[in-house]
Amino acid sequence: MVSALFFTLPPETKASVKQIQTASTQEEIRQNLPGLLDGLEPDHPGMHTTDTVDFDVVVSGEVYLELDDGAEILLKAGACVIQNGTRHAWHNRSSENCVIAVTLVGAERKP
């Protein structure tokens, strides 16, 4: 499975399943990115893990990438991150939208 998308993270928000409120939006995500919503953690807003290798490029704005150990990295336009099934969250603490281009390549997690 390979999926590519752009997503916009509004200011002062955390990506969370609670933000995806409409049934039609949830259905579109389930069809285009199977399993993505299942990786979100309700007890840790925005934190999620997927069985994919993720290629992320910040197109505009800036965003903090929070990693499993609590470390946060500020990424600005042009920054690229490659993640291999990493537990992480995105936080936009700026006053502008952040646009991120993502390509997800399906992978099989090994115990």
Image (spheres, grey):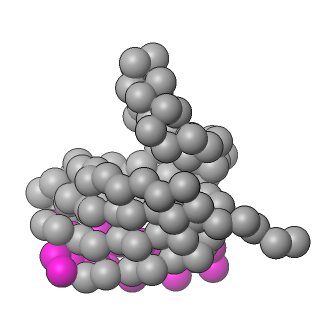
Q: Can residue 76 be found in the magenta stretch?
A: yes
Q: Is residue 103 above or below residue 36?
A: below
User: Which residue is drawn at the image coordinates 47% and 69% (left, top)?
Assistant: 54
Whether residue 49 can be seen here = no
- In the rendered image, the residue lying farthest to the front is 1
Please provide percent x and percent y for residue 9. Answer: 27, 52
Whether residue 60 can be seen here = yes
The image quadrant where one finds the N terminus is: bottom right
User: Which residue is drawn at the image coordinates 54% and 71% (left, top)?
Assistant: 53
What is the quadrant of residue 107 in the picture?
bottom right
User: Which residue is drawn at the image coordinates 16% and 76% (left, top)?
Assistant: 77
Please count the marks in the image.
0
The image quadrant where one finds the C terminus is: bottom right
* Left or right: where 32 falls relative to 8: right
* Left or right: where 98 falls relative to 89: left
- In the rendered image, the residue lying farthest to the top is 23
Segment tinted magenta in the rendering = 61-78
* Left or right: where 80 falls relative to 67: left
Please provide percent x and percent y for residue 10. Answer: 23, 48
What is the quadrant of residue 24 in the picture?
top left
Q: Is residue 28 above or below residue 16?
A: above
Please provide percent x and percent y for residue 27. Answer: 47, 24
Q: Can residue 75 be found in the magenta stretch?
A: yes
Q: Examine the residues drawn in magenta and state their main secondary structure.
A: strand
User: Which residue is drawn at the image coordinates 65% and 61% (left, top)?
Assistant: 51
Q: Is residue 93 above or below residue 6?
A: below
* Left or right: where 70 falls relative to 2: right
